[in-house]
Structures are given as structure tokens and as C-alpha cells.
Image (cartoon, rainbow, N blue to C red):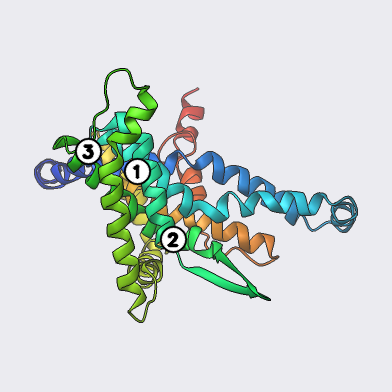
Amino acid sequence: MDKFISFMEDHFLPVATKISSNKYLKSISSGSMSLLGVIMVGAIFTIFTSITFAPYQAFLKATGLGTLLAYVPDFTTNLIGLYMAFSIAYHGAKEFGIGENAFNTGLLSLVAFIMLSPVTVQKNGPLANNMFNATYFGPKAVISAIIVALVVVQIMRFFMNKNMTIKMPEGVPPMVSKSFISLIPAVVIVVLFGLIKLGFNATSYKTFNDFIYTILQTPLQSLVGSFPAFLLLVIISQILWFFGIHGSQTVLPIVLPIWLGYMAENGAAIKAGKSVAHVINFGLWDLACIGGCGATIVVVQQLA
């Protein structure tokens, strides 16, 4: 037993410590966790619209409340990628020491993310309407949002640290001054992501989001969406707790974005009257950790 503990302390713990203190993972974790309120609201209203009780559904249809309730998931869980593009960049700016420009960093990340999304042109007689496909703002775009946010943070960080900014006189209001400070990196960011959009448009994938979804997100979903993988993550978390490291904080940043996407997809499936597609998700992790990591509420009850 002593040899095992010594091995873990020498080889496993240093790696776990580096993971838990990694600024990129902390940015992803903080940005994702800050959206739980949005996701929960969407999930609650999805349940309200999906209760299969005939008189209740008739009431929703007769009063028009069903349409009203259905709006909420469309603008919360179904746009999770859009919100993550802002929130991860916002928290990432704080993690990397440019907290004073956190809002502008999040906003530029949002602009870059939207730029990469395809635009559909719909003809309406002599007029043409340009429309975004909301699919590219939802769970399908979670990994794309993370990549965009982290890249934007690093660009902003480079310009801020090198003082390559436009500085206004002291009498200028702070909000105006901050806008000009971000002007040069903003130009670089929109030009860079504009070129990326053009580059992917020339490939068979057509969009950056479709490329990332095919190459990264789909394999990751298959990897972390199985029950054996879930059990392994729970076991690793418990081992880390045993050695005094916050197990959930180390494990969750790696899988949380994927699981949040699962929750949104599950909500859409429930809304459509289908069975839940992803049983392994963030909600199940909460059940495994109810009362403390490893469901230690049972131990607390016994001690009481």
C-alpha cells in the first residue's frame, strides 16, 4: 500500500495538479459553469412543455401558453454555443491577467464566433434575406466556441501585454477609452477569422463549425458518453480527493462542455417527444456527487 501511495504521489498527483491549475481548463470550466442558470431555465421550460397529460396540453394550446413556453428553450439551451463563446472568453481574460478588458474580450469572441457561422440567403421575390442557421449556435458548436474564445483571449493578451493599443487622453470617459484600447486587436481578430471563414468555405466541410464538429466534437462525445468512461472519471475524481486535490475541479473542465451540450440535446429530444439521447451527462454527475463527491450524503446520515 505504501508503494502504491508513493507511486501516486510521484507520478499521478503532479499531473493532476497541473491539470487543475491549467488556465485554459479553468477558463473553460468557469465559463461553462456560469451558464448553468441559462441551461437550467431552458430545461425547466422544456419539462413544462413536454408533460404528456392531455388536458394540460389542450390548455397550453387553447391559451397559447405552449408557444410562449417553447420560446424559452429556443433562446437558452439551443443557443448554448453562442453563450459559451462569450462566457469562456470573458472568464479567460480574467484568468490570463487582462481582466480590465474581459467584457471587450468576450464581445470580440462572440463577434468572431458569429463570423464563422454560415449565412443562408433566402429569396423573397425581388428581395433577399440573410439568415443565420441557429443549429450552429447550439450544442453542435460547443467545441468551436471554446476554440474561438481561447484564441481571442490569447490575441487580446498579446496586444495588451505588448501595449499595442490606442490610448486616449485622461479626460475621455473610461468606457470610451476601453473601446479604443481594444480597437487594434479587434481589427486583427475580425480579419483573422474572416480569412478562416473564407479558407474553410473552399474545403469540403464548408464551415469551421462543421470541420470541428466532425473531427473533434463527435469523437469526444462518443468517448465521454459511455458508462465505463463515466465510471472511470468518477473513480479518478475520488482518488484525487483522497490525495487532497479537488477531484471535480480537475475532471469536470475536460468533459463539462460536452455534457452541457448533452443536456441541450436531451431537452430538444424531450420537447420532440422522443427518448433521452444521452443518459450520461452533467445531471448524472450531480447524482453521483449528491451530498459530496461519491454520494457521501449516506455517510453523513449514518454519522448523524
Mark 2 = which residue?
A: 141
Q: Residue at image x 71%, y 54%?
A: 70
Camera sees residue 227: yes
Residue 75 in picture, x, y percent from top left: 60, 50
Say if 27 sits above or below 74 in the image: above
Q: Is residue 196 left or right of residue 110?
A: left
Mark 1 = which residue?
A: 89
Residue 236 in picture, x, y percent from top left: 29, 48
Mark 3 = which residue?
A: 21
Amino acid carrying label 1: it is Ala
Q: Is residue 62 left or right of residue 186?
A: right
Q: Viewer-nearest of labels 3 and 2?
A: 2
Amino acid carrying label 2: it is Ala
Amino acid carrying label 3: it is Ser
As rendered, which of 168 and 147 lies closer to the eye?
168
- Density class for disc 2 (Cα within 10 Å; few <14, some 14-19, many ≥20) is many
Q: CA distance from mark 3 to mark 2?
A: 26 Å
